[in-house]
């Protein structure tokens, strides 16, 4: 163990406070994204008095890792007190002048910690990362001021990311409002293939994939999608079907209809189709596909889930098409908004790299 590395057992303790008087009603869960999130559990008729209370500044984690792939559900509560299922483990930092809780959460946020927790998990029916294993975690514990400076630097970057995401949400809402103003109330009068060139994806052989940047960027499906642009995870040396930068990428497997934009020329797998405007009106096509996505989701809300969509069905999707002049008018209004969104998204990607760098340097 490095000289400045300490076992976590020296800094944390279990907390087990139950909601006996039902004074806390804010029911949350913990996601593999390491956030507290609203619980989706059906609590009708459930006795919430046995649920655990998590106070502001405390942690909770789900010890079962076998269901989460390479992730462990662990989060730090910086909002109002909440209750969570008794299946979670709640703990807190004993001496905040020795170990800053937010610094500890940064350590938990590292992908290396997820892999460590998964490796250390054990059990015959389901694998768990238990309290004793958590206590044996070793981490660097520099001076408290250094810890707080690291946390401050990280929060500065993440706050900037959050701001840019809010701006993009507002910009996209403005652009979509313009789209609805141009097309709202109109009946579908064309098929998608009339205004766009469509390419259905095909997956290469598995041995052609790599993460080292060899060959072409490869997107398999909606799991790669972000707010507007997908995240690069894989490359392939033998791509079969391709999208060009600016093309709409649409998920053609459940859930059908989710869309992103290709930010570079890329190979696409069987979970995606690339859709390119025939007249160069990329913004009009993108918001047309967003509108189609909303329509497809109505079927999901009604209990009919699309497992996939065929090439013929995709080509024949009914859309509202404007005449050439109106499409160009729309494009001139909305394309600049989309450029701002694109610029913000690229800044977000860069800031996320900074966050990754900060987390990677915690071991130094």
Image (cartoon, rainbow, N blue to C red):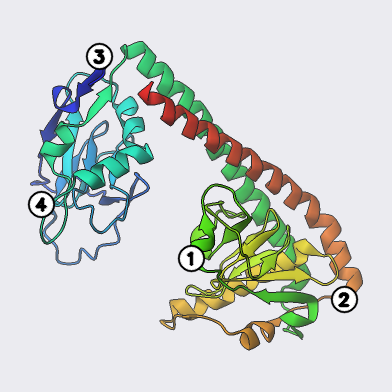
Label 1 belongs to which residue? Answer: 206
**Lower sequence index among marks 3 and 2:** 3
Residue 202 location (% of width, % of height): 59, 73
Residue 268 location (% of width, % of height): 61, 66
Separation (CA) of disc 4 from disc 1 = 50 Å
Label 2 belongs to which residue? Answer: 323
**How busy is the neighbourhood of tag 2: few (under 14 within 10 Å), some, or many (20 plus)?**
few
For this rendering, which residue is in front, 232 or 22? Answer: 232
Disc ID at residue 49: 4
Circle 1: element type? helix
Separation (CA) of disc 3 from disc 1 = 43 Å
Separation (CA) of disc 3 from disc 2 = 71 Å
Please tell me which residue is depicted at 36% across the width and 31% down the height of the picture. Answer: 106
Which mark is nearer the camera, 3 or 1? 1
**Lower sequence index among marks 4 and 2:** 4
Circle 2: element type? loop
**Lower sequence index among marks 4 and 1:** 4
Residue 7 location (% of width, % of height): 18, 25
Q: Is residue 302 above or below residue 327?
A: below
**Lower sequence index among marks 3 and 4:** 3
**How busy is the neighbourhood of tag 4: few (under 14 within 10 Å), some, or many (20 plus)?**
some
Label tally: 4
Residue 295 visible? The answer is yes
């Amino acid at each position: 163990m490095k000289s400045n590395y300490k076992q976590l057992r020296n800094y944390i303790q279990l907390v087990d406070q139950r909601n006996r008087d039902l004074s806390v009603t804010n029911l949350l869960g913990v996601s593999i994204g390491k956030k507290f999130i609203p619980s989706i559990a059906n609590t009708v008729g459930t006795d919430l008095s046995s649920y655990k209370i998590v106070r502001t500044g405390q942690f909770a984690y789900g010890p079962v890792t076998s269901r989460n792939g390479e992730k462990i559900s662990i989060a730090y509560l910086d909002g109002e007190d909440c209750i969570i299922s008794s299946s979670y483990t709640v703990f807190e930092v004993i001496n905040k002048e020795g170990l800053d809780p937010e610094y500890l959460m940064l350590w938990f946020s590292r992908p290396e910690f997820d892999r460590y927790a998964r490796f250390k998990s054990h059990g015959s029916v389901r694998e768990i990362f238990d309290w004793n294993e958590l206590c044996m975690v070793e981490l660097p514990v520099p001076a408290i001021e250094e810890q707080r400076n690291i946390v401050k630097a990280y929060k500065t970057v993440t706050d900037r990311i959050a701001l840019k995401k809010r701006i993009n949400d507002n910009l996209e809402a403005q652009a979509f409002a313009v789209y609805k103003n141009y097309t709202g109330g109109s009946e579908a009068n064309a098929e998608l293939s009339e205004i766009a060139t469509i390419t259905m994806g095909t997956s290469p052989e598995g041995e052609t994939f790599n993460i080292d940047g060899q060959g072409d960027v490869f997107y398999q499906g909606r799991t790669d999608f972000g707010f507007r642009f997908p995240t690069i995870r894989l490359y392939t040396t033998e791509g079969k079907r391709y999208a060009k930068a600016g093309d709409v990428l649409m998920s053609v497997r459940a859930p059908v209809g989710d869309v992103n934009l290709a930010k570079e020329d890329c190979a696409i797998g069987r979970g995606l189709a690339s859709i390119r405007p025939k007249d160069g009106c990329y913004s009009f096509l993108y918001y047309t596909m967003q509108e189609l996505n909303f329509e497809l989701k109505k079927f999901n809300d009604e209990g009919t889930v699309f497992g996939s969509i065929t090439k013929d069905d995709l080509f024949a999707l009914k859309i509202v098409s404007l005449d050439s002049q109106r499409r160009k008018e729309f494009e001139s209004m909305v394309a600049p908004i989309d450029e701002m969104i694109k610029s913000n998204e690229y800044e977000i990607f860069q800031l996320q790299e900074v966050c990754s760098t900060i987390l990677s340097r915690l071991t130094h």
